[in-house]
Image (cartoon, coloured by chain):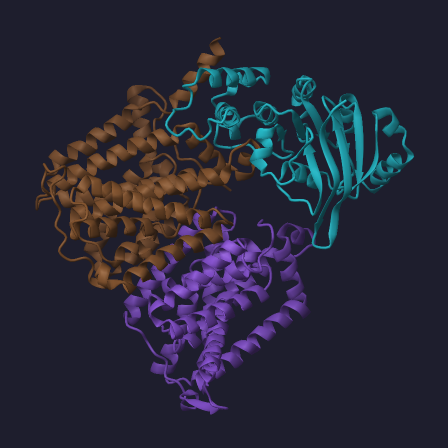
Chain colours: A brown, B purple, C cyan
Amino acid sequence: MTATSDVSSHAIARARWRPAEIAFWILAASCAFLFPSRYLIMTDIIRLALFTLSLDLILGYAGIVSLGHAAFFGVGAYSAGLMALHGIINEPVIALVVAGLIAMALGLLTSFLVIRGVDLTRLMVTLGIALLLEALAERFSNITGGTDGLQGIEMQPILGLFAFDMFGKTGFFYSLIVTFLLFLLARRIVNSPFGLSLRAIKNNPLRASAIGVPVNRRLIAIYTVAAFYAGIAGALFTQTTALASLDVFAFERSADLMLVLVIGGTGYLYGGLIGAVVFKMLQELFQTITPQYWMFWIGLVLVVMVLVGRERIHRWVLWGPNLIIRQVFGRKAVVAVPESDAP
Amino acid sequence: MTTLFTILFDGVAYGMLLFVLACGLAVTLGLMNFVNLAHGAFAMTGGYICAVLVNNSGWPFFAALPLAFVSAAAIGVLLERTLYRHLYTRSHLDQVLFTIGLTFMSVAAVDYIMGSSRIFIKLPAALEGQFDFFGVGIGRYRLMIIVICGLLTVALQLILARTRFGSRLRAAVDDPRAAIGLGINVPQVFAFTFAFGCGLAGLGGALSAEILGLDPYFPLKFMIYFLIVVTVGGSSSITGPFLASLLLGIGDVAGKYYVPKMGPFVIYTIMIVILIWRPNGLFGRAAAR
Amino acid sequence: MTIALETKGLEKSFGGLKVTRDLSLKVEQGARHALIGPNGAGKTTVINLLTGVLKPNAGRILLEGNDITDLAVHKRVLRGLSRTFQINQLYADLTPLETIGLAVSERLGRGGDWWRRMGTRGDVNQEIAETLGSFHLLDVMNERTATLPYGKQRLLEIAVAIATRPRVLLLDEPAAGVPESERHDILAAVAALPRDVTVLLIEHDMDLVFSFADRISVLVNGAMLVEGPPDEVARDPQVKAVYLGEAADA
């Protein structure tokens, strides 16, 4: 039956690798050789990209607005830091996974609060949890080092083979590989029936349950997965910088994260990656103008983006590249405008 | 026993202050389902204007308070007419992003103009210190707060219950579409309420400099408090937020006194317990719109 | 005859307002049953009670003899009770293919599969193709739902409900707002629903009701006024009074 094969090919098409995607990752990897003196900032960008990817999973795909995603980042960061500091788990990759799992457990625990109620309740709960953790970290400063943070973290070589070097080359490749692997996993997830059900929930939760989707169970699942991703991002932060201090939980970190995601666009996975690059460039630019008042510029960018309309800005930005693609390759634009938000 | 009363007294003062700060937010939420995370910025504005008038221009404290209200309300109405009103139909995400943006800008702007350290407002001598009331230490300033905020609360309740504007507002909160059908100019009601709420926040900001501390990070520090008040209290009436504010104020003061090391956790625990128990808030509507 | 869907003494009130009063309804297996009533009679509340969006204050709901009163919305769907929506509640950003695919995956219990890509299961694909085909949606299966003509959206509305393989289907005003030119397709789709699916039609449009239903219940002020075969209901003086009254108001 040809209709069935049509259905199959259309359904799979969404999950197929596009040339632009492959180009994106080749470009990302080649940055290692293009800018060998800038490993630290590039590692910074990759970490932020992974963290944003985590937010995209819940915000872009499931429509959960979070004001406190830094909670999971912070838990991952401290877990990794404490494990390295006290020699609990010395091998970075295992420690990374364990840190992710700890954040994941917290995600599972708090997801039951987050799925209850409306957007406003979610804002309060997510923000409250991050603040609660920050206060806990401050209270137990004998463990966390308080405002000074964890001191004297020394990282062992990755897999016992690759030692972290002072130029950050190892850290860069380590972060890039971890992020790429987790990206592949996220890509699988969002193109699966599970991912489809998330998009349906975001579009219309009432309707989703009316065709048999267990809405709460799906939201709990993705929130937990996103917590794992954020935990890994936090652990990467500690492992590549040998730092973990109270500000990993800060509200500004959660708010910046939203900005990064909306700059890049929600709901197509690359938003976080592209947003991270643009965000860091903006940061460099504004910090050369007025270093202390970075917050003002972030605020201005947020306000302008919303007033002009996020989708409109993305259309403007994509107009050039899509025109070239149409002219040169004679095919439809590859990068579509991201999906609209749920009403 | 007397400490208990002192804590109760301080807690009530704190709670009433929170109510004046946050009730405007509750109404705007109920009316337009608009999430305004920048509400604290209006409070901060009122506080700083009062501080400048009193400390630098030598105004009497009680003359500066109304001006804190008026100026915050004026800024509120200006922003409502120029920016906010474009966002009522947008997604909550857009509203959150926009108002966080405004908050950040206000924080940085105040930091730039006024410096980052905490400021104090010079109080008249009559308001300083405390007096003894049957063995209970009563802070004069806190007593004044309870009086002012108590009067405001009663006045608000009367306006809502007795006046024509109040009945329109209640109709609009109840069902905006039906209210438009009844010929109520909902955008106008909303603009007015928004401005009034901002004014109250500004007044609250001026009053809170002494108790909560006023610095450029005020809007961020107290965002969670405002959110708790409106989510726990619900937005269908002002009684809910009022009771939620008192609960939060007393809980916070008592927590900081009895378990000083765990002080900040008390309110979060209250918040989480209430949410598990009543996901739509203590006084919220059964079904969310 | 076996009873497919039954309510016993269903009550629902909002605040002090009783919107459903002591509603006892029996829908027979394979029936084409219509629930009609003037505006404000509480038809939508009945649907919300049946599907589990609202919880009744009193009374029970039985699906094929099993009590489903306390089941969550999605669990009722998996038990075989589906509905369509009066106003469009489709996924604007999803394609018809994805919408149907989701319903089929969930019914097969594969909706939580996070590792498998969409489109890789032959049985799912075949069922999607059959459903799309029987509702004339194959040609638009890969377009965003929001861009489809309204008539196609209404068809998809019914198609997605059918894709959950219901034994009882609640049709909430299937032809509401459909332009005259596309109306025929909808009516044909409704008429072609499999006979083994019990249908409860909630409708305003009397032509549709009388051409389709073999049994009619009339709801007024949340309570059952009359129930019987169409010709009997049409002759009933109480029903006439209600509808004439409404016509006089309008």
Number of callouts: 0
Q: Is residue A95 above or below residue B210?
A: above
In the displayed structure image, the side of residue A189 where residue C197 appears, left or right: right
Tell me where residue B119 sits by quadrant. bottom left
Which residue is more in the foreground, B174 or A320?
B174
Looking at the rendered image, the quarter that the N terminus of chain C falls into is top right
Identify the residue shown where x is 70% and y is 25%: C199
Quadrant containing the C terminus of chain C is top right
Q: Residue furthest top?
A: A1
Does the image show residue A312? no
Q: Residue at x 29, y 64 (%)?
A: A139
Which residue is nearer to you in this view: A22 or A159?
A159
Going by the image, does B80 lie left or right of B288? left
- Give the residue at x 31% y 62%: B108
Residue A193 in the image: x percent, y percent? Answer: 44, 28
When asked about the image quadrant of residue A271, the answer is top left
Residue positioned 16% across, 35% down in the render: A31
The image quarter containing residue A52 is: top left
- Report the side of A151 relative to C181 (left or right): left
Residue C144 spot, x, y in % from top left: 48, 27
Q: Position of residue C43 (x, y in %)?
A: 72, 38
Residue A105, compared with residue C88, is above or below; it is below
In the rendered image, the vertical position of residue C200 relative to residue A90, given as above or below: above
| Residue in the foreground of this view, choosing between A77 and C175 | A77
Q: Is residue A205 visible?
A: yes
* Along the line of sight, the residue nearer the viewer: A90 or C223: A90
Q: Is residue A129 left or right of residue C70?
A: left
Residue B83 in picture, x, y percent from top left: 45, 55
